[in-house]
Image (cartoon, rainbow, N blue to C red):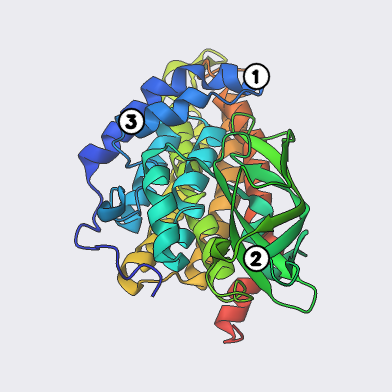
Amino acid sequence: MVLSHISTETSGVEPPLVERVRALAGRVAGPTAADRDRDRRWDPELLTELARAGAGCLTGPLVPRSLGGAELSAVQTFALLEGLGEGARDPGLALAVGVHAVLATVPLRAFGTLGQRARYLPRTASGEWPAGLSLRQTQGAALDSTVTARPAMAGLGGWVLSGELDLVVNAPIANHFLVVAAHHGGGRTAFVVDRTTPGLLITEAAPAAMRTCAWGRIVLDGCRVPDEAVLGTPLGAATEVEPLLATLDWVFTSAPWLGIMRALTRDAVNGAHQANRFGRPVAHAQSARFTLADLATRCELAGGLLYRAARRFDTDGRPSHQDAAIARLFAAEAALAVTEGMARLSGPLAFTGDHLIERAHRDALFFAETGGGTEVLRPVIAASLLGLG
C-alpha cells in the first residue's frame, strides 16, 4: 500500500490553511510573476520563503511528522497546490514546488529504505534540500529511457549510470535527483542520485514555456552510485516507482492549473463587469455570458475529477491509474479551453496588468503535452476499461 502509513483522519480540506497559502503565494510570488516570466528567471528565495512561511506544508505535505513533514492527506495537499496556483498566478513556480514536494518525495517515502528516508526526507520537507526530477521520467515505458545502468566492476559494488535527461525540474538548485535507468538485459531501476556524485553534470536548458520554473539538463557520464542509492527493488521500477510517478504527475501537477483556471475565471467575471465594448458593459453581451458559463463549468468539472483522483490516495492507500488519467486528460483540455476562452473574451481589453492570459495560454499548451499527453492518457484509460492493465 503506497500511502498506508499516512494519516487520513484529517482528509478534509481546511479552508483557513488553504486560504493562508493562497494569500501567502499572492503576497510572495504574485507581484513579481510577470517580471520573472519576462526575464525567464527563477528566484531562489521563493522556495525558501514559501517553505518557511508555510511551515513545511508546501515543501513536505505528505512526509510524516516523524520525518519533519506536515503529514497532510492527499486531498489537503492537492488543495494547497491549487491555492498556490491561484494565489501566485505562476504556473512555473507551482510546477517547481509540486515536483519537489510531491513527485520527488512520495516515491522516497513509499519505496525508500529506512536510511534513505532518514537521510533525505527531513531536509526535503524543510525545503533545505530541493529535489529534482525530469518530466520525461513520469511516463514510464511510454518513452524510451535515455539513461542506462550497469553493475560496477567486480569488487567495487554499486552501479554505473550513463545518459542524459532534459526537462529536469529544479535542476539548478536540487540537492538530489530521482533517476530511472534501463538495463541492457531488460528492466529498469530507480535511483536517488546526489548532486555531488562524480560524473553528474548539470547544464542549462529550458523549454519555451513555464519560464519561472528552475529548469536544466543533467548528464550522467559513467556516474557511479552505491547500492544504497537504489530506490525500491532493483529492476523493479516498472511496477513500483514508475506507476506511482505517473499518477502523482497526472494529479498533483494539475492542481495549480485548477487554481490558475479559477483565477482566470474570476478575472473574466470582474473584467466583464468593468469593461465596456461598443458603449455597453461586456457583461450584458450574450456571447460573453455563454463564455463565462463555459469557463465556470469546465473549472467545476475539472475540480471534481481531480479531487476524486486525489481522494483515492487517501481512501485506497494507492492511486487509481484510470481516475488519475481521466482527471489529467480533462484538466489539460479544460486549461486550454479556459485560456482560449479568456483570450477571446478579453480581446483587446486588458482585464489584469500581469499578463496572466498570455502566460497561461502559452504554458497550458506545454501542460497539455506533459504527462504523456493524449497519446498516453487515452490508451491508459481504455486499457483500464477493458481490463488490460
Q: Where does label 2 land, which residue?
A: 158
As measured in the structure, the alpha-carbon distance from the residue carrying label 2 to the one carrying label 1 is 44 Å
Query: Would residue 342 be seen by someone viewing this image from the given angle?
Result: yes
- Extreme residue in the top direction: 279
Mark closer to the chain start, 2 or 3: 3
Front position in the image: 209 or 215: 215
Residue type (three-letter) at the residue carrying disc 1: Arg
Task: Tell me which residue sits at (46%, 17%) in the image.
Answer: 31
Q: Position of residue 42 (x, y in %)?
A: 58, 26
What is the spatial separation of the Cα atoms under label 1 and label 3, in whole angstroms? 27 Å
Q: Amino acid at mark 2?
A: Gly
Q: Nearer the viewer, mark 1 or mark 3?
A: 3
> Which residue position holds label 1?
38
Q: What secondary structure is found at the residue carrying circle 3?
A: helix
Residue 206 in picture, x, y percent from top left? 72, 35
Q: Which residue is mark 3?
A: 52
Which dot, 2 or 3, sits closer to the camera?
2
Q: Residue 98: x percent and y percent?
A: 48, 45
Amino acid at the residue labelled 3:
Arg
